[in-house]
Amino acid sequence: MSLSSLRPRALGVPEGSAPVVVHGSLAEAEADWRALEATGILTPYQRYDWVRAVLASDLERADGVAIVVVRSQGRPVALLPLIIERRSGFSIARLIGSDISNSDWLAFLPGTDISPEWLGLVLDEVRELVGALDLVCFFNQPRQWAGHANPVLAVGADPGPNNLYTAIIGPTPAPYIEHRLTHKRRGNIKRGERRLEEMLGRVELRRVTTIDELDRVHAAFLAQRGERFDQMGVGNLFAQQSFVRFFRNLAVEGFSDRHPALCFHALYAGEEIVATTCGAFAGKHYSQYINSTASGPAAKYSLMGILVAKLMDELNASGIDTFDMGIGDFDYKQDWTAPEPLFDTLIPLTPAGHLAALGLRTSQGAKRAIKQNPRLWGLAQSIRKTLHNLRKR
């Protein structure tokens, strides 16, 4: 689908009306996108550099990209980076990178009055501009971001399969740590750090800022993560070339930025990399995208606890106020963060879209029923591991 020839058309509303422009490439939308990103409300997964890297690394196919920019009084006030796909005869739009991100979100300028009617008019205009479009999907949406309510949820909100694990870490880390961690747990982390240091050498967290160190840390991450995935019964998707390109290219671009689109940190004990974390920034928020820990003797010393404690201190010192550990329910996350429910919004634009939404809603509901039921989720994990082991033979 080629959208490069599309031109603005005005919405048919009398006051506060905004022209909607649909761009067929990221480059066409870059100026508006970066202007909105500078002062707007968005998660790390709607940053221009993140989305561009997703496409450049072939984590998404580039065909069918529709970058929706809504303008008012000469400036961008809202943005939706969409990819349009054909599924089972339906034309369905979702946010670029949604399948590999932690949060979907409509990027908008604070003060923009986004009502269900406003969004409906915008999406109707998008459908007119792109041609056939049956359904627009938002997945894994939080209720709020950076203190602003999610306006899309007023259109409709179905509980999603996942939770997002979030925390406030500003203005100083100490009160937060006192609130989230028991005295015993804090003592165990400090004791583990001392013993790890006695065994391997000085324990420190380093942010990766050179290509040589990135290569070493990324290799350690792939090995550690691959071993963990094998234990879980899943393949290491991060070893795929598209993800390797994505991590490397985006991390290198961010070496000199204070709060880049993506960066790696490594926890060293002596010269051994015992844990890693890869995260993304937006505004005053840091999102821990993926992490890894070493196995062997070092593993008994609460490696993730040591890493997160040091990471929170560094982030807070650099002006970061909020933090998340991504989606996925793991007990260790609750030492530091609290689960926040996420929501799906499916917006049909045609009668066919209503049918497509019904199918997707049923599928997402089944996933949630399994993931949020400990017995069913345990059974699903057991089956997954058995099938994984059989494939390895």
Image: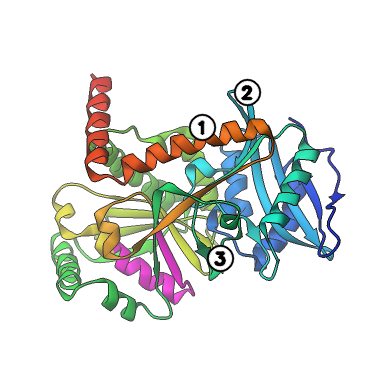
Provide the residue designation for mark 1.
359
- Label 1 vs 3, first from the N-terminus: 3
- Label 3 vs 2, first from the N-terminus: 2
Q: Nearer the viewer, residue 100 or 354?
A: 354
Front label number (1 vs 2):
1
Q: Are marks 1 and 2 in contact (CB under 8 Å)?
A: no
**Whole-percent x, y for residue 223 in the image:** 30, 41
Q: Nearer the viewer, residue 92 or 284?
A: 92
Amino acid tagged 3: Ala
Q: Quadrant of residue 368?
A: top left
In the image, residue 315 lies in the stretch drawn in magenta: yes
Left/right of residue 79 with respect to residue 237 in the rendered view: right
Q: Residue at x 27, y 34 (%)?
A: 380
**Whole-percent x, y for residue 363 in the image:** 44, 34
Left/right of residue 342 with respect to residue 1 in the rendered view: left
Q: Which residues are magenta?
A: 307-326
Left/right of residue 24 with respect to residue 311 in the rendered view: right
Q: Residue at x 22, y 33 (%)?
A: 382
Amino acid tagged 1: Gly
- Label 1 vs 2, first from the N-terminus: 2
Question: Label 1's element?
Answer: helix
Amino acid tagged 2: Gly
**Whole-percent x, y for residue 180 in the image:** 28, 71
Provide the residue designation for mark 2.
89
Seen in the picture, residue 66 relative to 176 is either above or below; the reply is above
Provide the residue designation for mark 3.
149
Q: CA distance from mark 1 to mark 2?
A: 13 Å
Determine if residue 327 is in view.
yes
Question: Label 3's element?
Answer: strand
Total numbered labels placed on residues in the image: 3
Q: Nearer the viewer, residue 277 or 172?
A: 172
In the image, residue 311 lies in the stretch drawn in magenta: yes
